[in-house]
Amino acid sequence: MHEPNHHEEAAVLIRKVAEGDRHSFEALYDQFSGLVFSTASRILSDQTDAEDVTQDVFVQIWDKAGLYSASRGTPVTWIITLTKNKSIDRLRSVQRKFRLKEEVQKENAIIDVRTDRKPENEVQLHENSQIIKNAVAELLPDQRTVIELAYFSGLTQSQIAEELNEPVGTVKARIRRAMGKLKELVSRRL
């Protein structure tokens, strides 16, 4: 009989959080932060990332408590699902940043081999970097925003969609159009 009361108590806290009750939010945090952190730690195998995910999950709980419905599962199930989703998003983001870093390092290695890092080639690299920056600046504002979020902030397409409150399909199309425009602008100048 103790478990249903525990779930009911947590559901009441979530309802109060949806109404903006900070004390209920603190009680919910006290009750579930350890579970959220340990779940995130198991998925991510990194304490700092798990701490960030824990914070993200509780921000999401504060923002979306009104969406919780007991018909879709217990409060624990809902919180664990949020934690798993945020942890997987973090994994993807870290992997994407790692791949991008590897690509940049490979590209730099190729440039280093080609240029032997001579002063005149350093100038060329700086000019190329400036061309790319200028090209990004020429994009339409909505295209520039998705490029900056995707490639400089490392957000996933779904995170960008959530951030901009846009459908994922719209975000994908903007990224595609922006990359096409960047390619055109950069190739004209190089």
Image: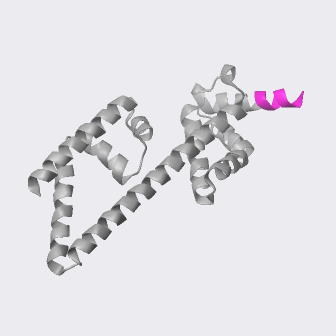
Residue farthest top in this picture: 71
- Asked if residue 143 shows in the view, the reply is yes
* Principal secondary structure, stretch drawn in magenta: helix
Residue plotted at (21% across, 62% down): 129
* Depicted 148 relative to depicted 79: above or below: below
Rendered location of residue 135, percent (x, y): 17, 51
> Is residue 69 a member of the stretch shown in magenta?
no
- Asked if residue 19 shows in the view, the reply is no
Magenta residues span 1-8
Picture quadrant of residue 29? top right
Describe the colour scheme in one phrase: one colour
- Count of labels shown? 0
Residue farthest left in this picture: 188
Residue plotted at (10% across, 55% down): 189
Foreground: 90 or 10?
90
Picture quadrant of residue 25? top right
Q: Is residue 123 left or right of residue 30?
A: left
Q: Is residue 43 left or right of residue 106?
A: right
Rendered location of residue 3, percent (x, y): 84, 31
Which image quarter holds the C terminus?
Answer: bottom left
Residue plotted at (35% across, 51% down): 151
Foreground: 189 or 66?
189
Q: Is residue 21 left or right of residue 166?
A: right
* Depicted 119 relative to depicted 33: above or below: below
Rendered location of residue 124, percent (x, y): 15, 69
Which image quarter holds the N terminus?
Answer: top right
> Is residue 5 a member of the stretch shown in magenta?
yes
Foreground: 78 or 117?
117
* Depicted 104 relative to depicted 73: above or below: below
Rendered location of residue 42, percent (x, y): 68, 51
* Depicted 138 relative to depicted 102: above or below: above
